[in-house]
Amino acid sequence: MIPARYQASRFPAKLMQDLHGKPVIVRTYEAALKTGLFDEVFVVTDSDIIAKAVSNIGGQVLMSKEEHESGSDRIAEAVEDMDVDIVINVQGDEPFIDAESLAKIIEVFKKDENQEIDLASLMTPITDWNEISNPNTVKVIVNNQNFALYFSRSPIPYPRDEKVEAVYYKHKGIYAFRKRALMDFKRLPMLPLEAKEKIEAIRFLEYGKKIKMVETHVTGIEIDTPEDLERAQKAWK
């Protein structure tokens, strides 16, 4: 499921920006299909403009019926009546998604025989302090089994003792959910930490859900700003 909103706060209409001849959302949809990992791929949107762009290439589109605060809420509405067990959320601004990273988070559920994991997501190490301190970059800290402890737009952990080595991880906005966890997400109200940080993954932590983080070294480019789009144009070549 690829949630797609037309009006983004930092970069309005970013999903319809041209990326070498096709809109960003179409490039992302095609990249998800190309992995060959999924039974079906859908774009979930409330925008007729986005729906038309995806339909024009023969893509599958589901129209949201309600207003939604987050992509997970949008997907939850879409899959509520579907007979599915695992749902993957790929952000619409991630045209550089790769099969290897997605396969890793799917594998988490194949190994989870007792069904203790509610969702899985990706993280990648970062070392550039400008990126670490950038609020547009969501960071995650994990325990010794790579379960998420917290997500933040602030640098976490805070470098109080600079002599202590710590790895900083960027959270990549790709999730794999058990359907039941997604339905819980839709039902449970937003709490203050999620509302303050504007990071939907925090809701799962606030309600005691277990998020398994998987490390990947495939960096890609998420298109959050016009500058990101410029980088994506160069990388696409």
Image (tube, rainbow, N blue to C red):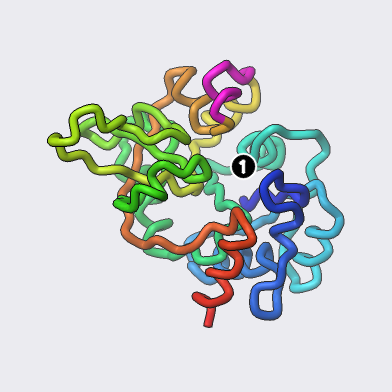
Residue 123 visible to the viewer: no
Image quarter of residue 52: bottom right
Residue 187 position, x and y percent, is 64, 21
Query: In the picture provided, is 228 more to the left or to the right than 208?
Result: right
- 6 vs 210, nearest the viewer: 6
Identity of the residue furthest to the left in this view: 163
Q: Could you tell me the amino acid type at mark 1?
A: Asp
Q: Is residue 119 above or below residue 96?
A: above
Which residues lie in the magenta part? 188-197
Residue 192 among magenta residues:
yes
* 196 relative to 56 in the view: left or right: left
**Which of the 4 quarters of the picture holds residue 33?**
bottom right
Q: Residue at x 65, y 73 (%)?
A: 19
- Give coordinates of residue 206: x percent, y percent: 47, 19
Q: Which residue is mark 1?
A: 83
Residue 111 seen from this side = yes
Q: Residue furthest bottom?
A: 237
Q: Is residue 147 above or below residue 101?
A: above
Label 1: how many Cα within 10 Å (few below 14, some 14–19, many 20+): few
Q: Nearer the viewer, residue 56 or 170?
A: 170
Residue shown at the point (41%, 49%) measured from the top left: 131
Q: Could you tell me which residue is drawn at 13 percent across and 36 percent down?
A: 163
Residue drawn at point x = 79 percent, y = 66 percent? 53
Does residue 42 lie above or below 117 as drawn? below
